[in-house]
Image (cartoon, rainbow, N blue to C red):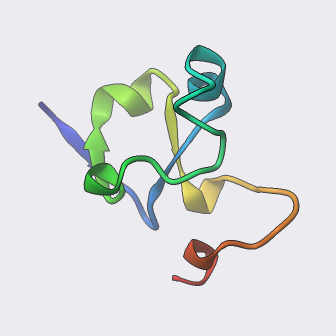
């Protein structure tokens, strides 16, 4: 399995939320074991995006400062 590394950490995309809304919320960090390196297929399928490329409106979270 080929992995891709995030500049900050990986978050779920809108597409991931649409597929499984009970498990994934757009902009939330993906599972901790995959937060820095995730399967390349997830990125290719549009399920994850790098936090640095995701613009969230509203409240700041602790990971914004890390």
Residue 32 locus on image (x, y percent): 33, 56
User: Which of 24 and 46 lies nearest the eye of the viewer?
Assistant: 24
Residue 26 locus on image (x, y percent): 66, 40
Residue 35 locus on image (x, y percent): 36, 56
6 left or right of 63 in image: left
25 left or right of 66 in image: right
For the image shown, how many numbered marks are present on the structure? 0
Residue 49 locus on image (x, y percent): 53, 44
User: Which of 1 and 30 lies nearest the eye of the viewer?
Assistant: 30
In the displayed orientation, state which residue is furthest to the bottom. Answer: 65
User: Which of 32 and 44 lies nearest the eye of the viewer?
Assistant: 32
Task: Name the residue located 82 percent from the left edge and 68 percent from the top edge.
Answer: 59
28 left or right of 40 in image: right
When asked about the image quadrant of residue 40, the answer is top left
In the displayed orientation, state which residue is furthest to the left. Answer: 1
Task: Name the residue located 63 percent from the left edge and 54 percent from the top edge.
Answer: 53
User: Where 53 sits versus 7, above or below?
Assistant: above
Quadrant assignment for the N terminus: top left
User: Where 39 sits versus 66, above or below?
Assistant: above
In the displayed orientation, state which residue is furthest to the front. Answer: 22
User: Where 16 sits versus 10, above or below?
Assistant: above
In the displayed orientation, state which residue is furthest to the top. Answer: 19
Task: Name the residue located 29 percent from the left edge and 44 percent from the top edge.
Answer: 38
């Amino acid at each position: 399995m080929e992995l891709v590394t995030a500049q900050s950490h990986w978050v779920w995309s809108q597409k991931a939320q649409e597929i499984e809304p009970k498990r994934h919320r757009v902009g939330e960090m993906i599972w901790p074991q995959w937060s820095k390196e995730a399967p390349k297929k997830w990125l290719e399928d549009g399920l994850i995006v790098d936090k640095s490329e995701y613009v969230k409106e509203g409240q700041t979270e602790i990971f914004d400062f890390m």
